[in-house]
Image (cartoon, rainbow, N blue to C red):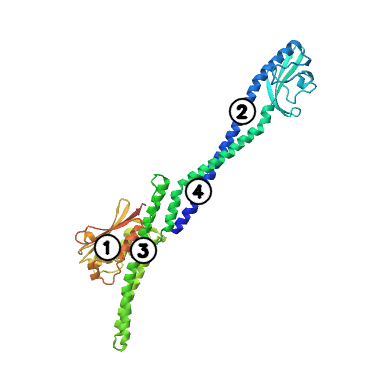
Amino acid sequence: MRVLAKRLSPSHWSVRARITAAATLMVAIVLVAGVVVFYTAVQRTVYRGLHGRGALVVGDLVTLVRETDPHGLLPVRDAGFTLLQVVDDQGRVLASSEALRGRPPPKVPPPRIPGRLEDHVIRSPRFQTDVYVVGERVATSFGWRTVYAGAPLTPFTSNRGAFIGLLAGAVLVGTALVAWIVAAAVRRALRPVREMSDQLADITGGEPGRVTVPEASDEVSELAQSVNLTLHRLEGVMERQRGFVGDVSHELRSPLTGLRTQLELALQHPEDEDWPAVARAALADADRLQGIVTDLLILAKLGAGVHVERERVDFGALVRTEVARRDRRVPVEVDAAEGIAVRATPEQLVRLLTNLLDNAERHARSRIWVTAARDGPDAVLEVRDDGSGIPPEDRERIFWRFQRLAEGRRRDKGGTGLGLTISRDIARAHGGTLVAADGDGGARFILRIPAEDD
């Protein structure tokens, strides 16, 4: 439990940090992208307005150039566009406004297509600011002329740093605010996980426990329900382990106590004892101990899911071979169909069939019947006897560990009470079932395991 709690606790901190970091990064990216888009939109709006005004100024200049071919000083009619020039086809400045008197043409590509207005933004060292320049190539009776109109971007340029700084500050503040909100929200959402972690840490191996299921129906409540289901299953496993240990200690204690008592009594008066008889009695108890230990090892391997190689087995042939392997107290009739293939461990199937045959032999009066057949997707084995049968209320109890009915204890005092338990575990390990069913007076066991097609 404490290991599970330790695994939950660090992960919840990791999840909170990761969610917060991811959300903050995403919001920061969105904010930066928004700032870039906003700044670009503002810039385009400014340039679009200047383009419209510049077109009017250039239009007036074009009319003036076509009519008079001005030289010298140009009048300024738009307070924004104070930088005016008229340049001939040789690149000589013919006329300019007062602000550009004696200045060369702007360092922009000259317009190539007559009548098309072209705009540029250049850096002007003289004005210490960016300048928005529009130009147009004009055909006049005096020759080709190029007119330029420029507007200093002093307000926009001088405030650009403050504007960008304000936007950057807004991004930082917004990102920090989002990080705090996300961290608080994640902390609140994962509070039940922290509570589950603390509750799991308080659960010990010897005490049952549960974690609190949140009232809200969400993934966290589903996690709490899954944890409780796991705890319930673990408690069941622990209870079965305790019961198994108790049963094993009881079953092992009896023959050990008997063996020790016999030897102690014999040693008190060794000259009066029949030592061959003492040895035979001790050997009988040792055989019982060996049988219990062997069965317990098989149960432990089956319960632990130890991987055992499986192979394709002819089910009918295995049944016939095992039945004919030794003579029994009563005749055994076999009806095993041909061509029934199963994927199994032969040794385990032999042990299962031997247990069923031994059980039937103990209770049969005159005959045992064994049949093996194919029933749909399953291979089916039936073992019946003509004994007194099994009461319906005991048909499940006989598969419990160390459970033996009164008749079984009377007929076989040396049994371990684990044969049917092992048989059912072998059936389950092969994906099948083993049950005690209604019979014609006697006991009837039915085994079903998946069959393989050719």
Image quarter for residue 76? top right
Which amino acid type is marked by label 4?
Answer: Val
Horizontal and vertical percent for residue 269? 30, 87
In the image, residue 10 sits, relative to residue 417, either above or below, namely above
Q: CA distance from mark 2 to mark 1?
A: 87 Å
Name the residue: 36% across, 60% down.
Answer: 237
User: Which quadrant of the figure contains the N terminus?
Assistant: bottom left
Q: Secondary structure at mark 2?
A: helix
Q: Amino acid at mark 2?
A: Val
Question: Which element type, helix, strand or loop, lies under badge 3?
Answer: helix
> Closer to the camera: disc 4 or disc 2?
2
Residue 260 is situated, as x and y percent measured from the top left of the image, at 33, 79
Q: Nearer the viewer, residue 101 or 359?
A: 101
Q: Which of the two discs, 1 and 3, sits closer to the camera? A: 3
Residue behind mark 1: 398
Looking at the picture, tell me which residue is in the foreground, 18 or 161. 161
